[in-house]
Image (cartoon, rainbow, N blue to C red):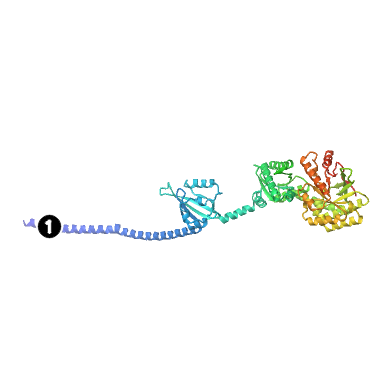
Amino acid sequence: ETDFKDIETSVQKLFSIIVVDYYKFFVLILILAVISIYIFIIRPTDIYLEKAKEIIKIYRKRLKRFNRKLQEYKTAIDTSSLVSKTDPEGNITYVNQSFCDVSGYSREELIGKSHNIVRHPDVPKEVFRELWETITSKRIWKGVIRNIRKDGREYYMNTTIIPILHEDNKNIKEFLSIRSDVTEIMRHRSQMVRQNIDEVTKLPNRQKLLIDLNEKISNNSKLAIIKIDNLKEIKDFYGMNVINRIILNIVEIFKNILSQHGVTLYRIDNFEFALFQNSNFENDFLIKIENLIRYFDHNILRIDDMDFSISITIGISRGDIRNIIFNAEFALQQAIEQNRDLVVLDSIDEIEQDFRKNIEMTNKLKKAITEGNIVIFGQEIVPNFEELPYKKYEVLIRMVDGEKVISPFFFLNIAKKARLYPTLTKIVIRKSFAYFQDREDEFSINLNMEDILNSEILETLREEIISNRMGHRVILELVESEKIENFDTVNRFIQDFKSLGCRIAVDDFGTGYSNFEYLMKMDIDVIKIDGSLIKNIDKDVNAQLVVKLIADFAKSKGIQTVGEFVDRESVLQKLKELGIDYSQGFYLAKPEKLI
């Protein structure tokens, strides 16, 4: 029993020890768990929260800066741009102050309206149709739109329209439009365009030609310069209104003949056009040019009830692109001087050859002057009726070069450039009086404006008339009368020499529409009708009407008439029928050497 109690006591002690230790162990475990929770859960969460707070703080600062920047951008856009918003139907829901300032409308006048309120009526409907189709397809539209202010003034907007979608990215919520005022830029651009466009024809002008040549020229380039030959005379007689109508008709003819052949047409001067082609269709270009010449040779231009005979002269440059415009102008000048419809210049070598020929001809002229080989020929002017006095001669200049007799066609222009022309005129004057002093025939000496303005020539002429007492047999024939501009000077010349007994003739009458004006302003005794009216007068009814008008007018003024370039009997008979006093031409008499 004692032993049992000892055992029981020992067990109780052991149990108590175990309970106490278990409790301690449990507490230990609990403490460890708490520590673990703190270490692994609570403490990291606090750290993360702190870090999250720091991040949020950073992003709040960034968001604040972003909002400030956004506000600055909005202010900048509002200040510099016109901003508007519309609903999906296109009705204005918002406009900024700049929109109101530029358009002239108040915000109240704009809200609820469509942009048609500022739409310019001249803008094609297709522009707005394309715009609307673009933005309603959820695409951005960009372009320049011409608008109109409330006061009627126009302005231009560089416009961007952006569709704003709902959160579902499917349906359009509104349209945002941002515009910048480009009115001054467009006006400047328009001014630049106007500077490159001819006002009458709306064709590109000389300045645009130079730009295009600089940008587009190639080895295949060809340039033609076209001169409308007799527009100056038409202008002098009919004025600029008729001229502009003629010009517009000519442009339409050019376009019809040149259509679809890659040729650009320019108006580079009052009476000059240019054609530029930048392709290798060489033959096609020349064929079109020839078609132009042929058209004007065979057709009359009719404006209202007025008929105009228009001719053209053309110079073409090809091959040498370095000097294409210079070459074309030189070719045109050659065509004019040689009385040809067309001259084609392939390279600068041809110009150099012409320069060498000019130098050679100048040397021949100087030698002929020194050696007395400038001679005069005379062509007889025959009366068409027996009661008229017989004979008259027109004095003509020639140059003798060895066995050859050279026409003034080949040397007069060169003589003018070499300043030898006054010397030639004085030789003609002196030799004419020397030949006719012992004869009774009347004779005419050709003078142009250069002669009339040259005091030495006039003094030589005056001395010969007075010393030979031949004024009553001298006819002073004014050639190149279309160049007469100072009628006061010409009239003083006429009065001066008519006081010495001379008579005054006008050459090439009828080729210029200003000729009748000359008759009203100058005291003329003889009209020489131009060969272009005479050569086909036996067939050309229009020429007959013009010549008949001239003849009747001349008779009413007591002026004698001469028909030039008579080359056949039928022409001579028609002149007689029309009442022309005298005839001149190879059919009647060829020029013969006088002295």
Question: Label 1 sits on what residue type?
Answer: Gln
Task: Identify the residue position indicated by label 1 in the image.
Answer: 12
* Circle count: 1
Farthest right residue in view: 438
On the rendered image, what quadrant is the N terminus found in?
A: bottom left
| Residue at the limit of the structure toward the front, as seen here | 556
Image spot of residue 185 (x, y percent): 57, 55
Identify which residue is drawn at 45% across, 58% down: 70
Q: Residue at x 89, y 44 (%)?
A: 387
Work out whether residue 412 or residue 484 is closer to the camera in this orientation and state it: 484
SS at mark 1 in the image: helix
**Residue 388 spot, x, y in % from top left:** 88, 45
Q: Is residue 89 visible?
A: yes
Q: Residue at x 29, y 58 (%)?
A: 42
Q: Is residue 348 visible?
A: no
Residue 545: where, in percent of width, then height? 78, 42
Q: How far across and how far down the image is residue 332, in percent?
A: 74, 48
CA neighbours of label 1 inside 10 A, class few (<14), some (14 to 19), many (20+) = few
| Extreme residue in the left direction | 1
* Side of 298 relative to 566 (left or right): left
Q: Nearer the viewer, residue 469 or 162?
A: 469
Taking the image as shown, residue 563 lies to the left or right of residue 38, namely: right
